[in-house]
Image (tube, rainbow, N blue to C red):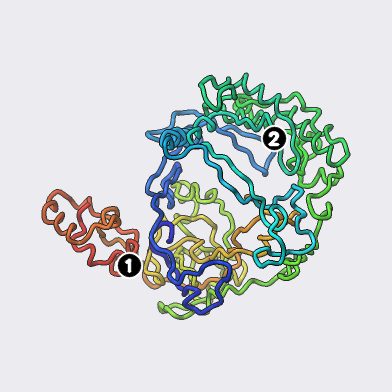
Amino acid sequence: MYLLGTQHGIQGKDLGEEGGEKPSEVVWHETAAEGKLDLLVTLDFRMSTTCLYSDIVLPTATWYEKNDLNTSDMHPFIHPLSKAVDPAWESRSDWDIYKGIARKFSELTVGHLGVEKDIVAVPILHDTPGELAQALDVKDWKKKQCEPIPGKTMPNLVVVERDYPNTYKMYTALGLLMSKIGNGGKGIAWNTETEVKFLGELNRLVTDEGISKGLPRIESDIDATEIILTLAPETNGHVAVKAWGALSKITGRDHTHLARPREDDKIRFYDIQAQPRKIISSPTWSGLESEHVCYNACYTNVHERNPWRTLTGRQQFYQDHSWMRAFGETLCVYKPPVDTRSIAPVLGQKPNGNDELVLNFITPHQKWGIHSTYTDNLLMLTLSRGGPIVWVSEVDAAKVGIKDNDWIESFNVNGALVARAVVSQRVPEGMCMMYHAQEKIVNMPGSETTGGRGGIHNSVTRATLKPTHMIGGYAQQSYGFNYYGTVGSNRDEFIIIRKMNKIDWLDEEIPPAPLLQRGVNKDALKSADECATEHFSDSDKVSSSVLPFDKGGLGGISAEQTTSGVIQ
């Protein structure tokens, strides 16, 4: 709501209105932020929900219109995305889109931004000496419990140089650091001068004057794939041997034998186009790729005696950090669901004549799409129920008179969602589930609770930060982007479900949103109506997918502001 300037379905009160305890280390605003971002740009190959809310949509190429790489931790192969046809209409490959943005950005920064230096706070990271910065206890320098020491009692402070006018030149060439400091990951590093020289021969060197002259080119998407394939130990046997050698210096044991049989393997993009290739064993993974052993996690920890990357160097089940002790998280044991206080304030408050039932709510992955992708595909819709669905047990459905394929509503203080019920004996009593990432752009009526169009699985969850995810400077409990950090613990939730009494598709005509949301006043609309009504047909009117105006639709624009709103 705060980013997109749109409506919401929140049923609960703000913390300030409830009179609850407020955070003390941040400034509390009594009035929540409203409005929208000045500019929202989305890159996608389909008109997703995010695209519908965006100011600019950059159409990207689909899987068979671009060259790219694809792999997974679910299998040991690396696959190509091969350009079979040119991108349709105005779409481009992801590489070309970002390349175009970089080029124009570099042009526009001249005279405004030059070579700038920023001080960046870098978290105390895992696999660095700093990971034992606070091994015994946690002290807060802001509360004068200790001295502020970068890298020990607070984040590291690093000066980062940003050369804005040369953004494009740096985007289209391999950086100098690969020759200066090499490559690495998870606490180990190795020299890459040989690979940089090879890439200069393969991709050719930049000849234009400037910061990137003499460096390997990354001009095309295939150039970018070759950079990855050459530098990664998983696709370059020589690099894999060097990587295992770097780990050997730390453990005191020779691990290079794990990659020696494939030392001469160098997988190129056209190799995987001919046939997907199996990756090479790498110390950045704990499993092993070989003809004799199927990949399984921690294989090298056991058979190569590599220490686990924990405080003890062993498999560690007991977590003795003071915060873990305080939250009862020292051992991985069953804990009952957290009371998120999302049910009591709305239970029975907006009756529709049907019985209500409280159930535990989970959102697993689905089989009719990959996240949100393909969920609006006609074939996938045909194979499923043709739109959003919630699975309910036969026992629970009978309690509240819900039959298979009935329209039901699920809601709590966080919001509401509308979907068809799938009544199944496979669902345990006391819980229901909705496969995640089913967007509300297909087959979605209005909600009786909110008055707006029904929501999605996240409409009834609330992302709350788990304090134990904020531990830092403590071995394996140290921040890492997309690795260990403040993720939202939003899966422990309860909802109220009930059969819907009235299905409202919200099909009434409304004034076109773009004109009204730009702040055009009612006098301007009247004037436009008087002079131009005859130039517009019924096709210029818009079928509503948002709230009616008298209920606060279009971000709260009132009915008075839309007196003569048939004009585009």
Q: Quick check: 535 above or below 462?
A: above
In this orientation, does residue 63 appear?
yes
Residue at image point 15% right, 59% down: 526
Kind of residue sitting beneath label 2: Asn
Left or right: 473, with 498 as reference point: right
- Pick whichever, 4 or 29, lies toward us: 29
Looking at the figure, which quarter contains the N terminus? bottom left
Q: Residues within 10 Å of mark 2 (few under 14, many from 20)?
A: some
Q: Whole-percent x and y of residue 89?
A: 37, 33
User: Circle 1 sits in a helix, a strand or a loop, which is it?
Assistant: loop
In this orientation, does residue 222 appear?
no
Left or right: 494, with 133 as reference point: left
Kind of residue sitting beneath label 1: Gly
Identify the mark nearer the N-term, 2 or 1: 2
Residue on which the image places disc 1: 552
Q: Whole-percent x and y of residue 34?
A: 40, 63
Residue on which the image places disc 2: 183
Q: Whole-percent x and y of residue 329?
A: 73, 67
